[in-house]
Image: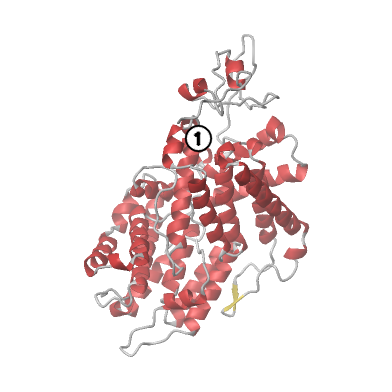
Amino acid sequence: MEESPTYATEACWTCRRRRWKCDRLLPACRKCDIIQEQCSGYGKEQPLRWTNSVASRGKLMGKTVPSAACPISIGRLLIDPGLQDLTPPMREYIAYFEQNCSPECVIYDLGATNPFKELMSLIPSSRGLCHIMVSIAALHRTQRKLNNRRLTVDDQVCQGPGAKGSKESARYYEYLYHKQKALYLLRTKCQEGPSQDPYGIIASVVLFIWLECLECGRDTWAYHLTGLREIMLAQSLSINFVQSTSLTAAFSRFYEYFDTSYAVFEILGSTLVKTKQQYRPLFTSIPTIDILKRSEFLTWTGCPAEILYVVSVVNSVSSDPTRSTPTLINYLFAQAESFSPQKWALSCPTFAHITPRYHVACIYKAAALIYMSQVFFHRPQQRHLLESAGVGTLDATIAHFTSINTEDTHFKGILWPAFIIGAEARTEHQRAVIREVFDHLWGFWRAQNVRHALEVLNKIWARQQITPDGASQPWIEYLYEQGENWMFV
């Protein structure tokens, strides 16, 4: 038997403001749902609402002031009523996050379309999100102050940032404090029910994964990713729920970003772990390839959608041995090999991006083929080992790294393929080029997963073994044996 609907004692604040007749239906009135307005709820106190209007009544009602190119400027941080109770250091960190962190998290920082900047509009209603942004900014600033500008000295990886200085800095303690505060608020929100603040909760988890990459890149990110899946399933935040909620129209851009970020984390995160996850869209019902095409612009990897899709299928096949038939394996290799870097690069409307996009596409294509050769190494039908192509082919692939200007925006997205291709390096020249790539990535990101990626590469290079038939022992098995979940993106 269906439960009878429950009603509030008074009209919602949105209907009061609009002077509409409210049906008082809980948790959100149907009137707001029909007109696709965000229901302000039935709280005792009227919620603060930021607008760009000159006046709320009279002749100037509805008139707006000219808006800046960025949706949330530093000026808003000073006058937004929802941020007035933040301490001055927190507001400074939020401003730092907007100016320095959010541009790094997308290939093309186009201001108003940067999803990380758009997430900042959720801060007034999600204090957990506020604290995780402050934590990221504090760690980001801490690691920017490191003295070791280079990651390697005499082919040795420099010691991590926590050894001296950084862990004793005030910013490092602020990073830890706000991280713990964000974890506490996230746990509390989940216990209360994510449907009360779904966007803030999901955004917080996504940023936690990014924070874990800055911190280390090992293991913990996987727990957050698993938690995100469980939250969506346990709280019925399924595709049908999302499509039926009144907030879908107003916040669909957030779900586009959640989908693309989840796709990148899930697909590339599964490549270096033994138990691989089969990727399925978590927030929308649009085709996977369309989500991955959005990820080319809404995330920082810049991986061609066709290549990322092949990698996702490889993960899915390897997680279910009954599906890894010779026909399917050969089909996957054929799909990857048929990808055209030239065509993909020329699809970009910006002329200056065509050349670096071509080199990025060649790098990702080669990395995908190497990854597939590792995953299907023991399949008797597998015929695409990179060694069979000779050292010259790997030299040509590595040359694409040196063809991208390290100041170019596309360079920051090549950590994953640099690790995959670097693991195949045999000569000292090849390894020197890869070390130089990691040096530049470290100088840009100062993320600990960059340092750990090179440490793992050094271990792989030190233990490279040859099988009786003359082929190299697959290095991916060494990663499986270690039992560590690495995220190198």
Task: Classify residue 90 by image quadrant.
Answer: top right
Quarter of the picture holding the N terminus: top left
Specify the farthest residue to the front: 1
Task: Classify residue 19 by image quadrant.
Answer: top right
Residue at image mark 1? 251
User: The disc labelled 1 sits on which kind of residue?
Assistant: Phe
Q: Is residue 274 left or right of residue 126?
A: left
Specify the farthest residue to the top: 59
Q: Residue at x 60, y 26 (%)?
A: 40
Q: Position of residue 322 (x, y in %)?
A: 29, 67
Q: Residues within 10 Å of mark 1 (few under 14, many from 20)?
A: few
Specify the farthest residue to the bottom: 468
Q: Is residue 456 left or right of residue 175?
A: left
Q: Residue 412 or 88: which is nearer the viewer?
A: 88
Q: Is residue 360 visible?
A: yes
Q: Is residue 414 visible?
A: no
Rendered view: 207 above or below 464: above
Q: Is residue 484 left or right of residue 311?
A: right
Q: Position of residue 305 (x, y in %)?
A: 36, 53
Q: Residue 449 or 321: which is nearer the viewer?
A: 321
Asked which secondary structure carries label 1, the reply is helix
How is the model colour-coded?
Answer: secondary structure
Q: Position of residue 169 (x, y in %)?
A: 77, 61
Rendered view: 401 above or below 105: below
Q: Position of residue 47 (x, y in %)?
A: 67, 27
Q: Residue at x 35, y 56 (%)?
A: 309
Q: Residue 383 or 300: which is nearer the viewer?
A: 383
Specify the farthest residue to the left: 327
What is the total number of numbered labels drawn onto the structure image? 1
Rendered view: 160 above or below 11: below
